[in-house]
Image (spheres, rainbow, N blue to C red):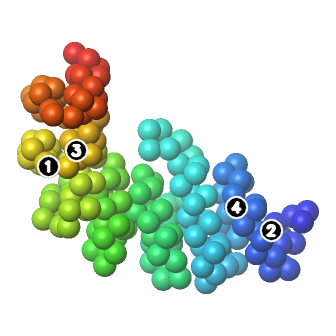
Amino acid sequence: MRSIAEAIEQHNIDALITFLEDKSLSIEEVKNIYEAFRNHKQIVGQVAMNLSLRTSVYERDKEYSETIVALLCDIATNPVDMGARWATAKNPHTPPQVLSLLSKDPINLVRALVATNPSTPTNILESFFNDEKIVRDGLSGNPNTPVKLLHILSDDNDKMVRMRLAENTSATKQILEKLLQDSDENVVKAAKSNLERIS
């Protein structure tokens, strides 16, 4: 297939999926494919995956564009693919109002991914503390989780929660020193490394 326009015209889904697997594909081309096939589950899912691949949680400004934000907003309310909502829920470019909508999603994994998203507003993160365990656990690694909740999570029975907390850049010195006494050696190692970073 020589061009995206041809693939769209010929409804060549396999070719379009292949194009979307390339995260260097221009965002305008991604948009064109999405708009032509917004009711096709596989295409919607692959567009969401493309947006995830091109977006770094650590370099949030990289690849930012109004087109990405518009696509994320549309995908969040597109009913054809639940997996696409997962990708939108975790994307740091997803706007707060969309994260607010997804924070009420009936699927707990979608809410859990909103809980891990560094762009999720504090008031939503606080509301998750009384949610299901899978959702609550997402709070431990989020740098925007209020410190009072991080303190409570430092006593969690799940070592993975304490592990994510030990790696959290917002964990206070007091929390990290507490985790140095943890029964799990990996938690201790992560807390020590994080403590060295802030010292």
> Where is residue 36 shown, x and y percent of the image?
70, 78
Judging from the image, what secondary structure is the residue with disc 3 in? Answer: helix
Residue reaching furthest right?
2
Q: Residue at x 45, y 56 (%)?
A: 91
Q: Residues within 10 Å of mark 3 (few under 14, many from 20)?
A: some
Classify residue 94 as left or right of residue 35: left
> Where is residue 12 shown, x and y percent of the image?
81, 76
Q: Residues within 10 Å of mark 4 (few under 14, many from 20)?
A: many
Q: Amino acid at mark 1?
A: Asn
Classify residue 22 as left or right of residue 127: right
Which residue corresponds to mark 1?
A: 157
Classify residue 19 as left or right of residue 79: right
| Structural distance between the alpha carbons of marks 4 and 3 | 37 Å
Which residue corresponds to mark 2?
A: 15
Residue 61, compared with residue 80, is above or below; it is: above
| Structural distance between the alpha carbons of marks 2 and 1 | 47 Å
Which residue corresponds to mark 4?
A: 20
Which residue corresponds to mark 3?
A: 159
